[in-house]
Image: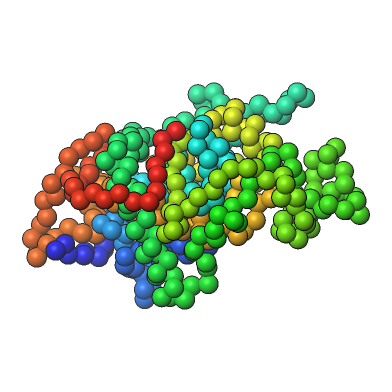
Amino acid sequence: MAQVIKPTSRDQFHIAVICALPREADAVTLLFDEFWDEESDPFGRAVGDVNTYMTGRIGKHNVVLAVLPGMGTNNAAASTASLRSSYSNLKLALLVGICGGVPRIDDDDVFLGDVVVSKAIVQYDFGRQYPGGFEIKNTIEDSLGRANKDIRGLLAVFETERMRERLMTKSADYLKQLQEAARRKRRRAKYQNPGAIQNKLFLRDYIHQHQLESCDTCSNVDSSGEICESASKASCADLGCDETQLVKREVFYPDDGGFNIFIGRIGSGNTVMKSGKDRDRIAAQHKLIAFEMEGAGAWDEVPCLIVKGVCDYADSHKNKQWQDFAAATGACVMKAILDRYVVAEGAQGSALTQTNGKSVQNNTRSISGNTFGNNVNISQGDMTWNMK
């Protein structure tokens, strides 16, 4: 049996998890196997680093968790640069949390609670505004581009049927563990799937607004494109959104609240996407599968992978009902990915390094710059994994 070895310095941390919201971090902490900072922070931080960290173990990895001071690419860039100054041996940072999803990817429907994983990032709000429209800067010098070879190798392995089955099964198991841990700890968040009846996708042209002409802002939405602030904060039930304007499609979730996983290009920017028309236009133009607000800031600072649960459809009808469940599914896929990620041989800092006082020599093989253990115990879960 492997012996847990507590790290003695920041140099022994190779994995970081970054969350933009406390709600996202709450879900992640339920999946830590052990914490190193129960009494105090034993590792400190570098001079000039203003971040506050949580440290612990997820599986075989020592992990540092950072919660951003706010959403957006600027906060992500500043905090990730500070993170890198304190934890200089990081090999992989995972941005974990919630995002807005594109409801249709090729021939597959995307539902609330599904998870997206980044293969590349497009900073869709970085460019030039011309009289005829907005042009994204996408030259070689300006583009964030694809992930590094290490991450690309990791993602490529997930395309095989064997690894897809492993990821599906592990993610389902971790969701059950997270939900049980939340009940045991009496967490306030609701990590259960709200149910198919609450998964509502309106036609992209149908805007979430006051239905009465008494609101001057909402009554002019067709010409101005703006709804009033009170309408943006109200639920569809409060505003009486017309459910005849819902997209007709079959929504199905397994009994255990299973979810789908998509890999592809993710749009990142400082603007919250709340327009069905703009969502579909930008997604089609750049072949995006989701929208989020931190990846573009962290991408240049550390090798990065975005793993986020879909909590809304990036339209004006977005609400917070699905945020807890989406945060949970994103966290579970993150942990399943870490199960398959191994830092290159020779790097120090694994949290599991000994058995019965003797060094462990893992039976491993190298694949595209990553090392993976040869555990062959495979079972089929209730989720599907789609590569786009």
Q: Name the quadrant of the C terminus.
A: top left
Near-viewer residue (236 or 234): 236
Residue at coordinates 58% horizontally, 46% vertically from top-left?
100
**Percent from the top left, x then y, of residue 64?**
38, 58
* Type of colouring: rainbow
**Percent from the top left, x then y, of residue 141?**
51, 25
Q: Name the quadrant of the N terminus.
A: bottom left
**Percent from the top left, x then y, of residue 84?**
41, 49
Classify 305 as above or below 177.
above
**Percent from the top left, x then y, of residue 215?**
88, 53
Residue at coordinates 53% horizontally, 43% vertically from top-left?
110
Classify 17 as above or below 249.
below
Residue at coordinates 80% horizontally, 44% vertically from top-left?
226
Residue 315 shows up from this direction: no
Q: Count the labels in the image.
A: 0
Residue 326 shows up from this direction: yes
Image quadrant assignment for residue 175 = bottom left
Classify 35 as above or below 21.
below
Position of residue 363 in the picture relative to residue 197 (left or right): left
Residue at coordinates 21% horizontally, 59% vertically from top-left?
352
Near-viewer residue (63 or 272): 272
Near-viewer residue (108 or 116): 108
